[in-house]
């Protein structure tokens, strides 16, 4: 029965075509795993990196250098009964003495985060770029050290409670984000770009000349894309759980359901993008136009809250924002299918899928 089904044969043809191209397998499965591994180890929990500071050489430079070294010595854990245990959040400061011209040159070229210029027994000047967060942070740390060394007394006493539990780390939030990115890339490149290539090669016209039902052709494309989704999601989840101890607190069936909704939304967008494009340049430009804003703004690599309140309505309407948010809710917070955040995401993704499929099928050009 299945052997005579156009849908099944088209579906099989799509699967065979995919598996016979090793480059596609790498970009769909290998690259996300490689990216997650590199970023996971780059941002894993570790002591803060040293702050590298250029100190201008001069009569008062030794006093400043000594104050910074004394503070760094106090950060090191001591044996016996330490009255002041090493702080897990205070970064050590590494000072390099340089002539004024060399220190200015490094700062002007962006090679240094902070330049300290001694100007007397109890005064100093900082040169730094206030638009670089690491420079502002270094300025605060070094100023605090020098103020204390000059005799400032702290009135209060702070206590640190580091939070490094699985579920709150960067890699825990990154893995669902990469799964969302894969759903977007698969829908746009796997369907949109594929269709335009068929149109350029006149293969769509050949398909059209056969008795093949058009809905079977598009349905087979969609079914193959959903098939590729299963190993894609499974591989990233296994990497997160086995290599980074990422927690899985929600129901995996709900997780896959949300990802399928996202894949359908992006498949509709891919079909819409490919509906009229007739060259690879056109479809590549359109896809970058669609993907780049979501790649940067949808909260995959950093929070959407960084973009301010005014941008939130636009960001929350993006399908990738909703997909990534819902995946994190299910995976990390244990949200179920009836959770309001998950339902909202499914509704928005469903609207994207229905709207884009409807428009795309109305304007799709087969030849």
Image (spheres, rainbow, N blue to C red):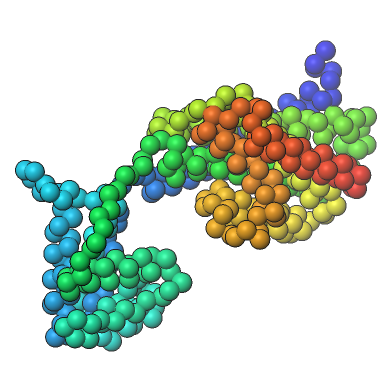
Confirm whether residue 190 shows in the render.
no
Task: From the viewer's perspective, tell me whether residue 119 is left or right of residue 83.
Answer: right
Query: Residue 295 at x, y = what percent?
Result: 61, 53
In the picture shown, does residue 227 fall above or below 75? above
Q: Residue furthest top?
A: 1
Percent of width and height locating residue 259 = 64, 34
What residue is drawn where x is 64% and y is 37%?
A: 341
User: From this viewpoint, which residue is outermost toward the left?
Assistant: 80
Whether residue 176 is visible to the viewer of this picture, yes or no, is yes
Q: Position of residue 213 (x, y in %)?
A: 90, 30
Residue 344 at x, y = what percent?
A: 70, 38
- Residue 212 found in image quarter: top right
Q: Residue furthest front?
A: 155
Quadrant location of residue 116?
Answer: bottom left
Picture residue at 84% right of the left edge, 24% below the top: 6
| Observer-nearest of 103 and 215 | 103
Quarter of image, res 117: bottom left
Q: Is residue 24 above or below residue 305?
A: above
Q: Name the foreground residue: 142 vs 240.
A: 142
Q: State the residue at coordinates (56%, 48%).
A: 300
């Amino acid at each position: 029965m299945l052997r005579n089904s156009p849908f099944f044969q088209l579906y099989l043809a799509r699967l065979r075509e995919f598996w016979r191209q090793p480059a596609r397998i790498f970009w769909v499965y290998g690259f996300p795993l490689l990216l997650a591994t590199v970023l996971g180890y780059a941002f894993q929990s570790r002591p803060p990196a040293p702050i590298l500071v250029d100190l201008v050489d001069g009569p008062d430079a030794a006093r400043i250098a000594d104050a910074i070294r004394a503070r760094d010595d106090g950060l090191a854990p001591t044996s016996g009964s330490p009255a002041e245990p090493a702080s897990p959040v205070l970064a050590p400061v590494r000072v390099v003495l340089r002539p004024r011209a060399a220190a200015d040159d490094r700062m002007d070229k962006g090679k240094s985060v902070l330049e300290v210029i001694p100007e007397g027994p109890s005064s100093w000047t900082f040169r730094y770029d206030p638009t670089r967060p690491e420079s502002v942070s270094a300025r605060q740390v070094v100023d605090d050290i020098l103020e204390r060394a000059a005799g400032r007394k702290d009135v209060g006493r702070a206590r640190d409670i580091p939070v490094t539990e699985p579920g709150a780390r960067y890699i825990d939030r990154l893995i669902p984000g990469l799964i969302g990115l894969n759903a977007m890339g698969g829908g746009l490149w796997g369907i949109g770009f594929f269709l335009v290539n068929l149109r350029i090669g006149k293969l769509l016209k050949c398909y059209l000349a056969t008795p093949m039902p058009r809905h079977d052709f598009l349905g087979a494309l969609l079914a193959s894309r959903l098939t590729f989704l299963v190993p894609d999601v499974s591989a990233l989840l296994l990497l997160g759980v086995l290599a980074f101890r990422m927690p899985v607190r929600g129901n995996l069936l709900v997780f896959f359901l949300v990802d399928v909704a996202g894949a359908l939304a992006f498949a509709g967008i891919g079909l819409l993008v490919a509906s009229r494009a007739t060259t690879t340049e056109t479809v590549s430009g359109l896809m970058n136009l669609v993907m780049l804003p979501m790649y940067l703004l949808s909260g995959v690599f950093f929070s959407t809250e960084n973009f301010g309140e005014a941008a939130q309505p636009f960001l929350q309407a993006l399908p990738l924002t909703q997909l990534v948010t819902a995946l994190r809710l299910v995976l990390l917070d244990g949200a179920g299918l009836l959770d309001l955040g998950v339902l909202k995401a499914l509704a928005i993704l469903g609207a994207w899928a229905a709207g884009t499929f409807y428009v795309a099928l109305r304007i799709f050009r087969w030849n």
